[in-house]
Image (cartoon, grey):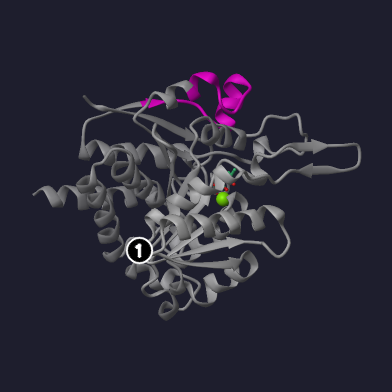
């Protein structure tokens, strides 16, 4: 039976990068795509960023593919106003997707596109494992007359399961990133990660690094890292920073997985309202997210690898969208990757 994929184009450039991704997937297999609203588009249509209907559809799918949410149209500091991001956060929480994987593997063809020197990024192959359903993102939020607070809370069980994901994915080393010199949650994080390590994964090296230092080391010595294990907000920030090792945030895919059930696959970048509607968006992170969906969500390794090699081939042949310093449009980027996929069959 064809795999059922819930597609969530969302806002801004979302629909422009989702449509070509479906054309790429159609080249590779027989899928049932079912489109639903999320984010600002859902707020406009039904007043909430994530409707019960969208969440129920996602829950019963084989995999969920999301493009991007958000935009200035829905920006507001009013705590009562619905926000597009609630759609994404609600989906992550609702599907129990606690493990967010963000691989950072700069392609040789893009060595010159990174703001860092090519010799520094050569050979970088790291994975950010970000805890995605806890911490300050989901702790109680309060707004008083003249103050506000966001609670950062982690349970041992939440830290244990994400630590297991990280150690299980590491080849040789896990760098656990925290702020244990200041935060109580970080001290618990350090204790629990160390315990999971010594009891279950003693063959993997473990180091602890403070988040400010990690931010510096990512630029000073990115090859130092194998798996970076960290909590929700630190992972959000460090993964945007790490994205620039690849030349553009327009290149970074991600996978969010839980304990069984469908995974969510989405590019790390946002909805880019500044270029939305102009056909200029780089669709490659979205294509690479579809590849992660095939590999991790649907166990279609050959098809996943085919997308990745078609993307690398297109870049080798000179494809550059504007974020990479070129002038290729979304349609041209799509054609280049599609041609690579068809060439493999002949
Ligand atoms: C990300 C994004 C989201 C996050 C936003 C859109 C809520 O920045 O996936 O990294 O902070 O998790
Ligand atoms: Mg982010």
Q: Nearer the viewer, residue 209 or 189?
A: 189
Name the residue rendered at 28%, 41% in the picture. Answer: 24
Q: Could you say where residue 226 lies in the image, as x and y percent from the top left?
A: 42, 66
- In this orientation, does residue 159 appear? yes
Q: Secondary structure at mark 1?
A: loop
Name the residue rendered at 29%, 55% in the picture. Answer: 311
Q: Can you say which quadrant of the picture contains the N terminus?
A: top left
Q: Position of 81 compared to 177: left or right?
A: right
Q: Which region is colored magenta?
A: 34-55
Q: Nearer the viewer, residue 20 or 151?
A: 151
- The correct choice, above or below, for 66 with respect to 236 in the image is above
Q: Could you say where residue 168 lies in the image, as x and y percent from the top left?
A: 38, 54
Total marks placed: 1
- In this orientation, does residue 269 appear? no
In which image quadrant can residue 247 be found? bottom left
Name the residue rendered at 21%, 40% in the picture. Answer: 28
Q: Examine the structure image and report whether residue 38 is included in the region drawn in magenta.
A: yes
Q: Residue furthest right?
A: 146
Q: Where is mark 1, residue-wise?
A: 171
- The correct choice, above or below, for 208 with respect to 2 in the image is below
Q: Examine the structure image and report whether residue 23 is included in the region drawn in magenta.
A: no
């Amino acid at each position: 039976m064809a795999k059922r994929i819930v597609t969530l184009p969302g806002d801004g450039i979302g629909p422009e990068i989702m449509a070509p991704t479906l054309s790429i997937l159609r080249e590779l297999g027989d899928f049932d795509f079912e489109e639903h609203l999320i984010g600002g588009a859902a707020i406009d249509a039904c007043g909430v960023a994530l409707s019960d209907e969208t969440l129920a559809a996602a829950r019963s799918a084989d995999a969920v593919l999301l493009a991007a949410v958000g935009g200035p149209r829905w920006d507001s500091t009013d705590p009562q106003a619905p926000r597009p991001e609630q759609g994404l956060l609600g989906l992550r929480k609702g599907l129990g997707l606690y493990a967010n994987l963000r691989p950072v593997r700069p392609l040789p063809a893009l060595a010159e596109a990174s703001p860092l020197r090519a010799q520094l990024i050569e050979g970088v192959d790291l994975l950010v494992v970000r805890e995605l359903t806890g911490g300050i993102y989901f702790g109680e939020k309060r707004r008083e007359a003249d103050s506000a607070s966001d609670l950062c809370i982690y349970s041992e069980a939440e830290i244990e399961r994400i630590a297991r994901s990280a150690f299980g994915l590491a080849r040789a080393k896990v760098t656990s990133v925290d702020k244990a010199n200041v935060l109580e949650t970080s001290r618990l994080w350090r204790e629990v990660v160390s315990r999971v390590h010594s009891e279950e994964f003693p063959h993997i090296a473990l180091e602890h690094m403070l988040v400010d230092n990690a931010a510096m080391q990512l630029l000073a010595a990115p090859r130092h890292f194998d798996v970076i294990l960290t909590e929700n907000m630190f992972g959000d920030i460090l993964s945007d920073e790490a994205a620039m090792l690849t030349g553009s945030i327009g290149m970074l895919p991600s996978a969010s997985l839980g304990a069984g059930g469908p995974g969510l696959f989405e590019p790390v970048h946002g909805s880019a309202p500044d270029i939305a509607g102009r056909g200029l968006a780089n669709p490659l992170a979205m294509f690479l997210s579809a590849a992660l969906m095939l590999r991790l969500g649907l166990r279609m390794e050959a098809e996943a690898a085919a997308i990745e090699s078609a993307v690398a081939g297109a870049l080798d042949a000179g494809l550059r969208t504007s974020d990479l310093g070129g002038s290729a449009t979304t349609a041209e980027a799509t054609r280049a990757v599609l041609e690579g996929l068809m060439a493999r069959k002949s």
